[in-house]
Image (cartoon, helix red, strand yellow):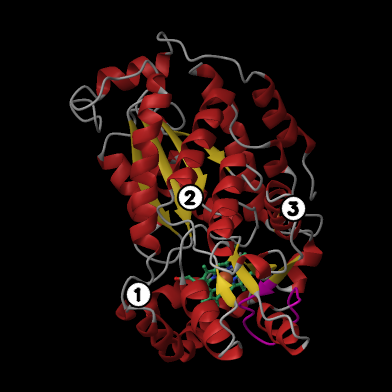
Amino acid sequence: MAFRAPLNQACRRATASSSATFALSSPLASQWRRSNATVAPSKTDLAHGSKGPTAVMFMNMGGPSTTDEVGGFLSRLFADADLIPLGRLQNYIGPLIARRRTPKIQKQYAAIGGGSPIRKWSEHQAAEMCKILDKTSPETAPHKPYVAFRYANPLTEDTYKKMLEDGFGGGNGGRAIAFTQYPQYSCSTTGSSLNELWKWRNRLEGKRATGEVDPEGAITWSVIDRWPIHEGLVEAFAQNIEKTLATYPPEKRDDVILLFSAHSLPMSVVNRGDPYPAEVAATVYAVMQRLGMKHQYRLVWQSQVGPQPWLGAQTSDTVKNLIQKGNTDMILIPIAFTSDHIETLYEVDEEIIGEDAKGYDGVKRAESLNGNLVFIKALADIAKAHLESGSPCSPQMTLRCPGCVSERCLAQKEFFAGQAKEIQAQA
Ligand SMILES: C=CC1=C(C)c2cc3[nH]c(cc4nc(cc5[nH]c(cc1n2)c(C)c5CCC(=O)O)C(CCC(=O)O)=C4C)c(C)c3C=C
Ligand code: FES
Ligand SMILES: [Fe+2]
């Protein structure tokens, strides 16, 4: 039940035909061009590739842009059974916990300037990536950027509706990529965003919503589900670390300890077989290799919430422990998120560096990727390779966790893997 070989084979078959090129004569593509002569997003400003336009949806959890949005953000987060399973009482307990936590979390967002910068960075990264992709993949141009957040505006539902308004799907066909902005896959993060996307796809474009158009006129989706060791990602992290290393006096530089810090997972999720810890470790190892393995390093985990056991060692304990032992030069590197957020700006900068390591100037943080051009080029490179692969997702995505009992996961994976047929029909 937990593993579905046919799903995995669907992804493998599609990956195997990765050299297939999209033909001008694709029935869906020509249907798209006919029926969208006036509504396709960037027809007027860009030369149309034979397989364009392509929507690229950046998926992430999002964060409240203002302190007033904290309540809504937390209530959606605690209502998400893929992130925090609370059983049959989810709809009662979730809002209660969210309400109780709101004032504390509002204070944290107030302390970092009044809101999360994740929307600003995601919109910037998506727009800049699409500009690069228009040049490097002209046949799938124009590429139209979208951002879909799981718990904050712009929500997946609203972004999907915007895509329909822009002329993708809704009877017109069209091609879209769901591009996770979590480099490492967790069922609690990317998995949850995909379950949400699949839910809204069914509500807005499923047979029940549209009668006869499913699947012919619906959007053809594919998924970029993980990219933990992409060399551009690794290079961007490595350059930021090197920049911070350069701020230490030369005689101390080689002894600086590198502490890679990632958001932790409850042990119940780790023991279910979630791929995230292994993929985060893969990123860390690749960055260390790029840096020539010249420094001592550890992967540590932060942001535990609630009383149950979480994966350790905890970042704050590790920093305190190292200082106690006399190691006062270290760089904290946020390794599982691509822009600044409350965990970097508040938890690391304010709580760990500002309080736990107060007075120790050798404890520093590497910059987050944010608007880093090496990183944005890497995103474009990942998207181009994905489009060329003709694959609906990575082979890994269709292998469920050994402990997964979620029907949502199963149905979502079947849906996305099943898009292989549509992608190949357009090839
Ligand atoms: C890769 C990143 C993340 C993973 C994995 C992750 C798993 C995870 N998170 C919770 C519970 C909470 N997370 C909260 C905030 C939050 N989580 C991440 C990232 C990951 N979470 C970020 C970047 C943020 C902050 C967003 C921002 O705007 O900056 C919160 C809310 C804050 C709080 O109440 O403390 C909760 C709760 C679980 C249970 C989990 C794995 C199952
Ligand atoms: S929880 Fe991992 S596949 Fe369902
Ligand atoms: Fe989290």
Eyeballing the image, is 32 above or below 204? above
**Where on the image, by quarter, is ligand 1?**
bottom right
Q: Are marks 2 and 3 in contact (CB under 8 Å)?
A: no
Badge 1: few (under 14), some or many (20 or more) residues near its Cα, within 10 Å? Answer: many
Q: Amino acid at mark 2?
A: Leu
Q: Are marks 3 and 1 in contact (CB under 8 Å)?
A: no
Q: What's the residue at 38%, 21% (across, down)?
A: 138
- Side of 129 where 400 appears, left or right: right
Q: Is residue 182 magenta?
A: no
Dividing the picture into quarters, in which one does residue 53 lie?
top left
Q: Which residues are magenta?
A: 301-313
Q: Is residue 306 magenta?
A: yes
Dividing the picture into quarters, in which one does residue 416 lie?
top right
Provide the residue designation for mark 3. Answer: 285
Provide the residue designation for mark 1. Answer: 115
Q: What's the residue at 74%, 57% (across, down)?
A: 281
Provide the residue designation for mark 2. Answer: 197
Give whichever of discs 2 and 3 has the lower sequence position.
2
Badge 3: few (under 14), some or many (20 or more) residues near its Cα, within 10 Å? Answer: some
Q: Main secondary structure of the magenta part?
A: loop
Tag in front: 3 or 1: 3
